[in-house]
Amino acid sequence: MGDVFKATLMDCHDELRAGWERAIEGGGGGEVAGFGAPVVTEDEVGELSRGWNRNPERNSLAESWVKRTREALRCR
């Protein structure tokens, strides 16, 4: 879970902050919808957690979560 939080909240902090500011200034609208969309499901996290520290795809998966989070926030 730590890697999910880091990829989606810490690594994208500036984008999240800017997105919230845009949503507040714009009265919410469609901007807020992307904030609740998970980039990885609970089932995926459960499956990935088994052997995560030995997973050779670990870094590329975390990078994909960052990319998907930024895309969801429309901050590329």
Image: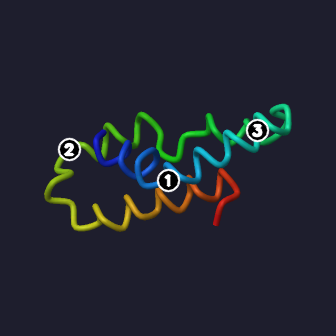
Can you give x and y, in whole percent of width and height, for residue 14 in the image? 54, 52
Q: Distance between the residues labelled 2 and 1?
A: 26 Å
Residue beneath the point at 52% across and 47% down: 39
Mark closer to the chain start, 3 or 1: 1
In terms of secondary structure, where does tag 2 sit?
A: loop
Residue beneath the point at 22% across and 67% down: 56
Q: Which amino acid type is marked by label 3?
A: Ala
Please determine whether, in this image, residue 11 is positioned above or below residue 44.
below
Disc 3 residue crowd, few under 14, some 14–19, many 20+, Cα 10 Å: some
Which numbered disc, 3 or 2, marks the residue closer to the eye? 3
Q: Which mark identifies residue 23?
A: 3
Which numbered disc, 2 or 1, marks the residue closer to the eye? 1
Can you give x and y, in whole percent of width and height, for residue 55 in the image? 21, 60
Mark closer to the chain start, 3 or 2: 3
Q: With 37 as the anchor, is 8 left or right in this view?
A: left
Q: Which amino acid type is marked by label 1?
A: Cys
Q: With 12 as the anchor, is 25 left or right in this view?
A: right
In terms of secondary structure, where does tag 3 sit?
A: helix
Please determine whether, in this image, residue 30 is positioned above or below residue 76.
above
Disc 2 residue crowd, few under 14, some 14–19, many 20+, Cα 10 Å: few
In front of the other: 36 or 51: 36
In terms of secondary structure, where does tag 1 sit?
A: loop
Mark closer to the chain start, 2 or 1: 1
Q: Distance between the residues labelled 3 and 1?
A: 16 Å
Q: With 3 as the anchor, is 73 left or right in this view?
A: right
Q: Which residue is under mark 2?
A: 50
Can you give x and y, in whole percent of width and height, for residue 61 in the image? 38, 61
Q: Which residue is under mark 1?
A: 12
Please determine whether, in this image, residue 72 is positioned above or below residue 32.
below
Please determine whether, in this image, residue 9 is positioned above or below residue 67.
above
